[in-house]
Amino acid sequence: MKNFYLGTIGALLLSLGAGVCHADDATQWLDRMGVALHEQDYQGTFIYMRGSQFETIQVTHQFKDGRELERLVYQNGEEREIVRRDNELVCYHPDPHNADFDHNLPLGPFSTAFNDNLATSQDLYRFSLHGKERIAGRTAVKLKITPRHDNRFGYRLWLDEETGLLLQSQLVDRNRVLELFQFSSIQIGQPIDTAMLNSSFGDTAAVHQLSPVITEVAEQQSSRPVWRVSWLPDGFKPMYSRQSNLLHFTDGLATLSVFVEQTGTASLPDMTTSHGATTVITRRLKNAQGQITVVGEVPVNMARRVAESVEPALF
């Protein structure tokens, strides 16, 4: 026991409680996570669970000559592969006649957007370290991202002790897990075969480009919005949108979208539903014909309050 309390970490444990370290240490690990996501070479298999959705995906990632190269191979459900060259995402389907093009990349901490936006979220979340655990055969440092208010979800992250690469994440509402990402096997720092970074499907495959998630905070909309949201939680800012009836917001980690459809009759009844961490609320417009749809990785009560605050924009 005499060596247990030596050094800076021991002093922090004494002052803050066993197993919990200072926020500055946690943010340093988050910085390492961002660098590792971009610059480490790795191959592995991870699972992604969101509500009733469960996916197993093989990933091969290489950083070479300042460029990121990556290939995702889906192991269950419809066959498809996603090949990434920096920010360019291309999806391949082997059967062009039965391909489902309505999909996107798994979101959450294992994404460029999440890591790039962490720096803007320091005032909205608390960051803390909580000891070490073992994930995919490797020692991992556990880190918590806790919202300062109840109108957001939190995260638990497990980062590889050697490299900082994310090995597991949980998106949580208090202690209830809403989404799960976890490597079941991984090799880090091994040579990558270039052929593993190209699609294995032939020339007859259906190919389409995926749009990256919108993360840019808007300085000026390309078109003047017809609708406005009169209430947003602290920290949420508008994001760039080309459509006047579609509004996007983010606090750096969570996103929120509001779509207003003006039709003679509402296409959906008023309803509230959740899928994993994603909440969907539809309701009829007040004093007008049409429908509001709010979609976001936010608690139901927050999404409902946003929906109730939608009103025509007056200029």
Image (tube, rainbow, N blue to C red):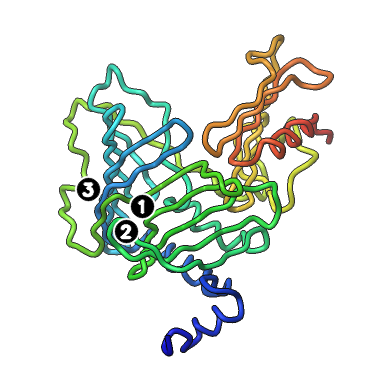
The residue pinned by badge 2 equals 67
Q: Residue furthest top?
A: 264
**Residue type indicated by callout 1:** Asp
Element on which disc 3 rests: helix
Q: Residues within 10 Å of mark 1 (few under 14, many from 20)?
A: few
Q: Is residue 227 left or right of residue 39?
A: right
Q: Which amino acid type corresponds to the residue marked 3 in the rendered image?
A: Leu
The answer to whether the residue labelled 2 contacts the one labelled 1, judged by CB atoms less than 8 Å apart, is yes
What x and y, as percent, mark residue 18?
Answer: 54, 73
Q: Which residue is mark 3?
A: 197
Residue hosting label 1: 86
Amino acid found under the numbered disc labelled 2: Arg
Q: Position of residue 284 (x, y in %)?
A: 74, 19
Q: Position of residue 112 (x, y in %)?
A: 45, 53
Secondary structure at badge 1 equals loop
Q: Nearer the viewer, residue 249 or 178?
A: 178
Which residue: 58% across, 71% down?
A: 23
Q: CA distance from mark 2 to mark 1?
A: 6 Å
Q: CA distance from mark 3 to mark 1?
A: 12 Å
Mark 2 or mark 1: whose residue is earlier in sequence: 2
Quadrant showing the C terminus: top right
Q: Are marks 3 and 1 in contact (CB under 8 Å)?
A: no
Mark whose residue sits in front, 3 or 1: 3
Residue at image coords 58%, 31%: 274
